[in-house]
Image: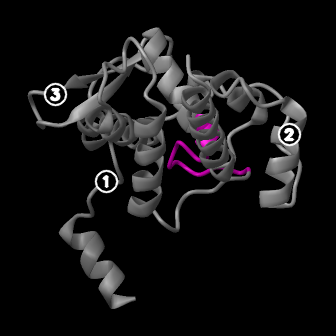
Amino acid sequence: MSLGFRYQADVNEQIRALELIKRKLRTSIVIKVCNTLRIQDLRHLYYTIHHEKPAPGQLPGIQTITANRESYRYVAVFVSIYRNASRCNIRTEMDVEALMFAWDYFCLTFPGHIRERRPYGNIRPANFDEAWAIAESVQAGLIELAYCHRCHHNFLTNYYSHLQPICQLCAIKKRPGPKPKTRTEQSINQAV
């Protein structure tokens, strides 16, 4: 291997590490992707960019990300974007560039709704750590996209969830809502 090629590979890996840290990915994950940099350098870079220490702890599990049916819809949208942006099979390998593109596009689609800090809303993934955990879950086969022939949308199937593996859009539409008011109740409300 020539020295110039090795230098170019190191520069590309450093650029990738910088892009991942800009999106606030945990440094413990960045070190797995970019192994030519030291963890101390990554932590310093994170602090320099964000003026805070990187988040400690483990990645959130897919069960906590998809805790309710509403969050399934947004995770399905994110996985669809990731799958369409990827140049490889996302079930067998992770495409980091496609994941970064999917996250950026997802943030543009829902600009004021994504919360990076707790309490999280129903729009998940709430941060790039969760997006990474979703991509790892797809690769591990814990979740996958399926196609609903009734409403013609993709839906997410989580094999380790307490919810049935059915289309979330159809399930939300079938959910019983408030009882419709009768004409006498409407007339009484208008009179008051």
Determine the CA span between mark 2 and mark 3. 47 Å
Upstream in sequence: badge 1 or badge 3: 3
Q: Is residue 138 left or right of residue 41?
A: left
- As drawn, the residue found furthest toward the bottom would be 191
Task: Tell me which amino acid carries mark 3.
Answer: Cys
Query: Is residue 91 found inside the magenta-colored segment of the image?
Result: no
Q: Which residue is mark 2?
A: 41
Task: Tell me which amino acid carries mark 1.
Answer: Lys
Tell whether label 3 touches label 2 (CB within 8 Å).
Answer: no
**Residue 28: x and y, percent?**
77, 28
- Packing grade of label 1 (10 A; few <14, some 14-19, many >=20) is few
Q: Nearer the viewer, mark 1 or mark 3?
A: 3
**Quarter containing the C terminus:** bottom left
Quadrant in the picture for residue 105: bottom left
Upstream in sequence: badge 2 or badge 1: 2
Visible residue check, residue 91: yes
Residue 177 position (above or below residue 3): below
Q: Nearer the viewer, mark 2 or mark 1?
A: 2
